[in-house]
């Protein structure tokens, strides 16, 4: 890692010129930058902790959720049907009662089946201590920026780089771009950050997947047309001029 004359930090390595192939040669300056009712109450520990009631036309629904050691009950009623269910926290008493409809209908049966399956699925995923855990998934900018930060701090390692690069490559669209959400269109700044991260990982610029990405970026104005945040990341390594970033006076 080396200090540059303009106050930015540069690093030697495969991505020292990573952004050269992303610039639009025709661009020299950066672009500017029906009526339901609901009530809820909460009480101190040792009593029913929360009660919520929602009323839709022709139906009635009540729900009570309590902390461990308290009783809880939930009742959901479909139009023209009667149904009751109780779900409690681990270690507390629980009971469930389902009343079959007086007059069976496809809609009521489907709704009841969906409710049971949903509850069963959620309870099956609950930890024994009462909480749930789920994966947080986002676009590739998080992985790309993680590699950039590690490079800047001098702590990037091969294992982390290879894992991140594998994920980033797997999210690339057929046209060479990366999107900000699943199934979305290619996005300029996201594609630039993913490209630079793969250059850090050692992907050569003449590789087919890299060449497609670079050509797409150039056709849309290059780095100059990217968001300010992306250009700030690049400026940390001397790949973009700090003087070409917008300034906000401290006052």
Image (tube, grey):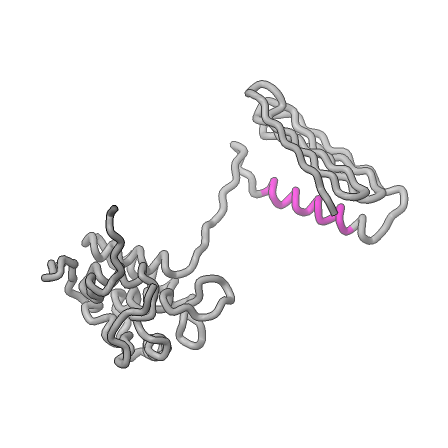
**Residue pictured at 80% horizontal, 48% vertical:** 108
Q: Residue furthest front?
A: 251
- Magenta range: 110-124
| Residue 91 x %, y % | 59, 26
**Residue pictured at 36% horizontal, 79% vertical:** 219
Is the magenta region chiefly helix, strand or loop? helix
Q: Is residue 84 left or right of residue 173?
A: right
Image quadrant in which the N terminus is located: bottom left
**Residue pictured at 82% horizontal, 44% vertical:** 79
Q: Is residue 225 visible?
A: yes
**Residue pictured at 28% horizontal, 81% vertical:** 26
Who is closer to the viewer here, 247 or 98?
247
Who is closer to the viewer here, 26 or 139?
26
The verdict on residue 37 being magenta is no
Q: Is residue 139 left or right of residue 160?
A: right
| Residue 218 x %, y % | 33, 77
Who is closer to the viewer here, 160 or 225?
225
Above or below for 2 versus 123: below
Q: Is residue 10 left or right of residue 189?
A: left
Q: Is residue 163 visible?
A: no
Above or below for 89 versus 183: above
């Amino acid at each position: 890692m080396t200090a540059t004359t303009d106050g930015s930090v540069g690093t030697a390595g495969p991505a020292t010129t990573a952004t050269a192939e992303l610039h639009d040669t025709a661009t020299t300056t950066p672009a500017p930058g029906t009526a339901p009712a609901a009530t809820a109450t909460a009480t101190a520990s040792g009593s029913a902790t929360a009660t919520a009631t929602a009323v839709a036309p022709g139906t009635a629904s009540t729900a009570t959720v309590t902390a461990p050691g308290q009783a809880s009950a939930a009742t959901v009623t479909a139009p023209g049907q009667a149904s009751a269910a109780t779900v409690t926290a681990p270690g507390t008493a629980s009971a469930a009662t389902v009343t079959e409809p007086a007059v069976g209908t496809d809609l009521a049966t489907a709704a009841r089946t969906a409710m049971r399956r949903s509850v069963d699925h959620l309870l099956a995923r609950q930890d024994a201590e009462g909480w749930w855990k789920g994966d947080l998934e986002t676009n590739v900018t998080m992985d790309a920026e993680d590699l950039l930060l590690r490079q800047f701090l001098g702590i990037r390692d091969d294992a982390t780089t290879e894992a991140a690069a594998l994920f980033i490559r797997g999210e690339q669209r057929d046209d060479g771009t990366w999107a900000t959400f699943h199934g979305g269109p290619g996005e300029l700044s996201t594609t630039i950050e993913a490209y630079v991260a793969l250059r850090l990982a050692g992907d050569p610029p003449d590789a087919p997947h890299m060449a497609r990405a670079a050509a797409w970026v150039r056709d849309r104005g290059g780095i100059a047309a990217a968001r300010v945040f992306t250009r700030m990341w690049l400026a940390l390594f001397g790949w973009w001029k700090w003087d070409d970033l917008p300034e906000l006076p401290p006052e």
